[in-house]
Image: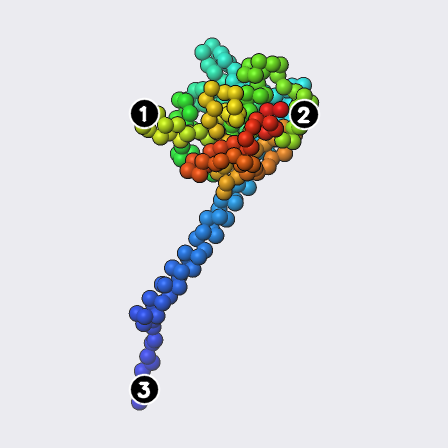
Amino acid sequence: MKRRSIKSGFTLIELLVVISVIALLTSILAPSLSVAKEMARATACMGNLRALSVTMGLYHGDNDQRFWPYRLDNWPSPGVKCYFWGTDADPVDQSASPFMNYCDDNPEYLWCPSLKWGSYIPQGWYVSEPTTTYGYNGRYLDPALNGTNSRRLSSIPDPSQLFVLNDSAMFWQIAGRSIFQNSTYLEPVSGNWVQQPTSHFRHSGKTNALCADGHAEAYGTEGWNLDKVNMLGFVGTRNYPHYEQ
């Protein structure tokens, strides 16, 4: 007499136990995965700033160690404004920017992966493509904005502390509407009529900055009371030494 083989399978209880274990492991691992992803984005952002450090060095080499303008009016043609990231046109023309000419045709260096395109309302009329998510310290470095001669690297007392480019964003409340935007200009702690923080602490409470000596570093608030909703603030409670010297 032939014996019939009996195939065993999961019982309903065993299946529910397996599902519960998977759900438990997922709930335990999900925060770790989220932290790991943000660490990867922060590392990529730091890589962008290091690449922009090379661009800065090349620009300095050809321009007597001077910094580039935040904006040029009527450039490259009448009625056009050209910022350090490109023209105020749609599409943006990066090649018109004196700074971007040294950037090896990689505008992606100006886009932090932690502030993705589509997660903010873009500044100005540039609605079809991103411009930059890093704010330039034009108030201190651009002669048209600070009323002095263009800054030379050698004239900065402590270039290892002065921000040139910084993770940035801005927040407005206008007519009851909340607007979160990228910011291409790095606001100082004081001295500007807007006087709102634009340093964006988007990397787990840290903000990445490219300093004048060419190194990139992550900074905490250093005493500033951070806006925990929009993660906007300043590094320190005064302009010296990060925003001006």
Mark 2: amino acid: Pro
Q: Gap between marks 3 and 1, in whole Å? A: 84 Å
- Is 202 displayed left or right of 9 in the figure? right
Mark 1: amino acid: Ala
- Crowding at mark 1 (Cα within 10 Å: few <14, some 14-19, many 20+): few
> What's the mark number on residue 157?
2
Q: Are marks 2 and 1 in contact (CB under 8 Å)?
A: no
Q: Are marks 3 and 1 in contact (CB under 8 Å)?
A: no
Q: Is residue 101 visible?
A: no
Query: Which residue is situated farthest in the top direction here?
Result: 78
- The kind of secondary structure element at disc 2 is loop
- 77 versus 153 height, above or below: above
| Residue at image point 40% right, 31% down | 180
- The kind of secondary structure element at disc 1 is loop
- Crowding at mark 2 (Cα within 10 Å: few <14, some 14-19, many 20+): few
Q: Gap between marks 2 and 1, in whole Å? A: 43 Å
Q: Who is closer to the viewer here, 37 or 102?
A: 37
| Residue at image point 42% right, 25% down | 123
- Is 62 displayed left or right of 108 in the figure? right
Q: Are marks 3 and 2 in contact (CB under 8 Å)?
A: no
- Is 86 displayed left or right of 53 in the figure? left
Q: Gap between marks 3 and 2, in whole Å? A: 94 Å
| Residue at image point 31% right, 89% down | 1
Q: Mark 3 or mark 1: name the one nearer the start of the chain.
A: 3
- The kind of secondary structure element at disc 3 is loop
> What's the mark number on residue 2?
3
Residue position marked by numbered label 1 in the rendering: 175
| Mark closer to the observer (3, 2) | 2
| Mark closer to the observer (3, 1) | 1
